[in-house]
Image (spheres, rainbow, N blue to C red):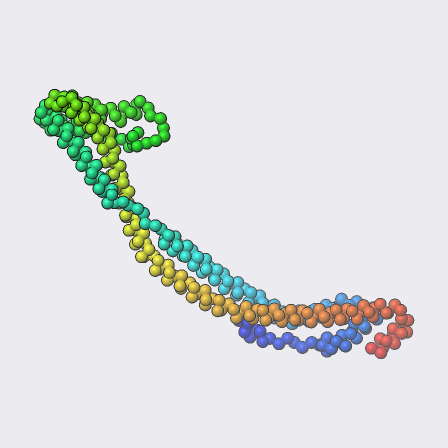
Amino acid sequence: MSTQPGTTRSAYTPEPLPAWLADEDSLRDEGVLFGLSEARPDGKVAQIRAFFARQTAPFDEMVDESTERIGELNLFIEQRENRITTLRDQINELLAREPRPNNLIRTVVSLVLSLGVCVCNFYLIDETLRPLFPNRLIAVGVFLAGMFNLFSRTSFLYEDGPQLSVRRILAETGLPLAASVFVLVQALQSQSTGQAIALFSFVFFLFLLAGNLFLSNLVALQTALANIDANRQSIQTKAQRLPGWQAEIDRLNQEVDTLRIQKWPLVTALNHTQAQITQLNTRRDELVNLFVSEFELARSLRDRLSEQQRNSMLNYE
């Protein structure tokens, strides 16, 4: 026999039935003889079942082999389909990535403007202090002292939530206020009181706001550059991976189609073999039922007949 399911074995020809089993009349006679005698029907029924078991054995083996091979092909198909699903999910995830906003131009302009405000504030302080303190380093020191809040991580002016403490207010406004008062005192020496107070107010709020604005723009610039780099990497990833993933999906689809082409003849042969097994089992059950029914009918009549009648019928048979 061939080892390929659905080829040579599907042409297997069962051995012919014995005469007493092939002819239903002969089987009826067998049933009657067993029924009239003292014999039990179990042995004859076992013979019928054993004969058909020999006939279905090759087909059962073919079913096992075909089922195993179909199971292997189904496993291969499932593995490739799972990989296809994974690749498609990765492709969809990559395509769904939206470019991160960067606002680079706005951030750069804001940074330049905030830097310009800080520089102008320095020159304003320098011009105010120069008549009394010609050394520019003093103006630099006052400016840096006023910009001390530049080094704070956050500012209460830009936050909502927790209650403010006196310590925090003093920590963030102490040096800017002291530097502004120092500028005010020096401005009173050369300017009118109104001009000096206006200068004080202007410099004080520039210290409070411009420094944190400058830092915020630096952070925004860093974020914008990071987003630009992430967008560039995303574009490179799409260009590098999408063609390879799509090519792998196409290859896997071709393999799945090839496996299915190999599978369907096996499925057809398996269905045909199972139909042959069902046909043989149905014929077996019909013959067993025929024998048993004749046996039971004869057994029910045996007790009504005399011994002479039974012997005469047995001898006749």
Q: Quick check: 289 above or below 224?
A: below
Give the side of residue 181 with respect to residue 297, left or right: left
> Residue 300's x, y, as percent?
84, 67
> Of 302 and 246, which appears nearest the observer?
246
Nearest to the observer: residue 301 or residue 135: 135
* Number of callouts: 0
Q: Quadrant of the C terminus?
A: bottom right
Query: Residue 112 location in percent, x, y?
Result: 20, 40
Direction from residue 64 to residue 156 in the image, left or right = left
- The answer to whether one can see residue 54 in this image is no
Res 163 visible = yes
State the image quarter where residue 271 is shown: bottom right
Residue occupying the point 19% across, 28% down: 203
Q: Quadrant of the N terminus?
A: bottom right
What residue sits 67% from the left and 77% below the top? 16
Point out residue 2 in the picture as x, y percentages from the top left corner.
54, 73
Front residue of 149/14: it is 149
Residue 218 x, y percent position in the rendering:
24, 39
Q: Is residue 8 above or below residue 149?
A: below
Residue 129 appears left or right of 77: left
User: Residue 86, relative to residue 138: is it above or below?
Assistant: below
Residue at x 90%, y 74% (from the top left corner) = 308
Quadrant in the rendering for residue 143: top left
Q: Residue at x 39, y 54 (%)?
A: 92
Please state which of residues 99 and 272 is positioned toward the viewer in this rendering.
99
